[in-house]
Amino acid sequence: MNKERLHYGSDQSGLICAYLFTGQEAGKALRGDEVLQYLDQAQSLAPTHFIWLHFNLANASTEKWLREHSQSPEEFYESLHQGSRSTRIEHADQHLIAIVNDVLHDFSFDPSEIATLWLNVSRNMMISTRRKPLKSVDHLRNAVNAGEIFHSPMELLTHLLRDQADVLTGIVRDATTKIDEVEDHLLAERLSRKRANLGELRRLLVRLQRLLAPEPAALFRLLQKPPAWMADNDVHELRQSTEEFSVVLSDMASLQERIKLLQEEIAAHVGEQNNRSLFVLTIVTVLALPINITAGLMGMNVGGIPWAQDENGFWIVVALISLITAIAAWVARHFKNKD
């Protein structure tokens, strides 16, 4: 059982956790009834006060509860049911609707272990929903529980994006280690199953690249025309996190290219080994050909077989076969050296 399911199970409404931030102290955990009270007075909260609600979308009650209590725009609910999972961020009635892709909490380099986080960010609230436990959200919750102070929902979002970049950096670092290991095996000519390992890594990186590549562009478009309630400091921090994320994506693209070149080198190495094995098999077949032909001819039950009555006939045949085999071996060696 993974960590988030073990410690952060959702309630009947699908709420996993909720925090109230005042801008001056660490986030305060809220119970379900307290969340409803703050939602009722959300519009009258002080400018420095905001809340973060995190939901489990796998709970069938989550969407119904959000529609009844959160006053989220319809675009947010539409994004929950859209087939596309590519990262994007867009405005909707003074809300930011974001779709962010992340890896599962117990990530094991499986391309299927990538899931989506949906976000609705406004002046005094951030709502996040997911169907499976995700690493970046867990890192953000750990930061809140550890007492880190946040001054706005955008600071939460920025921290989440940086956590996402840190997770990707870890994936790239671990993948680089695996690729280094494959390279070492290649140089030592001990490949075993390493080609399959490279294929899995490349599929993972390609899928991550495809899902995450639109994120920097979406954030830069947002930064060109941010919401009115978004502070200048939040814009600056978000721009920095976007640049960091772009660097990670660049490293990921470089790693994909390295895997591709390594796969080509391994394929060439395997092809060379196969050609060498085929050449040895051909030489053995050619060298065995004289004795096979002679045995076949001498074994025919017909008259006129030479040296049949000669007491030295066997040795004469052996000498002829040895001579022909030696000539064939010389010819094969000559062609090998010529190549």
Image (spheres, rainbow, N blue to C red):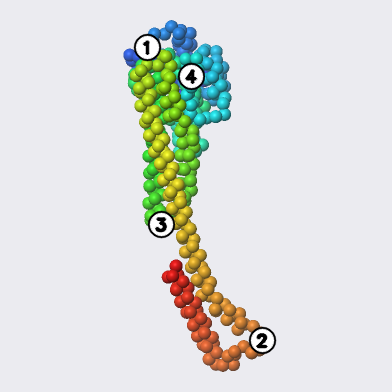
| Residue 110 sits above or below residue 319 on the image | above
Q: Secondary structure at mark 2?
A: loop
- Tell me what residue is drawn at x 46 percent, y 51 percent: 264
Tag 4 near tag 2, CB within 8 Å? no
Pick whichever of labels 4 and 1 is earlier in the sequence: 1
The reply to whether residue 1 is visible in this rendering is no
Pick whichever of labels 3 and 1 is earlier in the sequence: 1
| Residue 47 sits above or below residue 156 on the image | above
The Cα atoms of the two marked residues, 4 and 3, are separated by 55 Å
- Tell me what residue is drawn at x 49 percent, y 33 percent: 211
- Which quadrant holds residue 172? top left
The reply to whether residue 217 is visible in this rendering is yes
Pick whichever of labels 1 and 2 is earlier in the sequence: 1
Q: Secondary structure at mark 4?
A: strand
**Could you say which is closer to the camera, residue 140 or residue 84?**
84
- Tell me what residue is drawn at x 51 percent, y 87 percent: 315
Q: Which residue is mark 3?
A: 189
Residue 48: which numbered mark, if any?
1
Pick whichever of labels 4 and 3 is earlier in the sequence: 4
The Cα atoms of the two marked residues, 3 and 1, are separated by 62 Å
Q: Is residue 270 left or right of residue 142?
A: right
For the residue marked with disc 3, what is the amino acid?
Glu
Q: Which residue is mark 4?
A: 91
Crowd rating for badge 3 (residues with CA inside 10 Å; few <14, some 14–19, many 20+):
few
**Could you say which is closer to the camera, residue 264 or residue 126?**
264
For the residue marked with disc 4, what is the amino acid?
His
Outermost residue to the right = 302
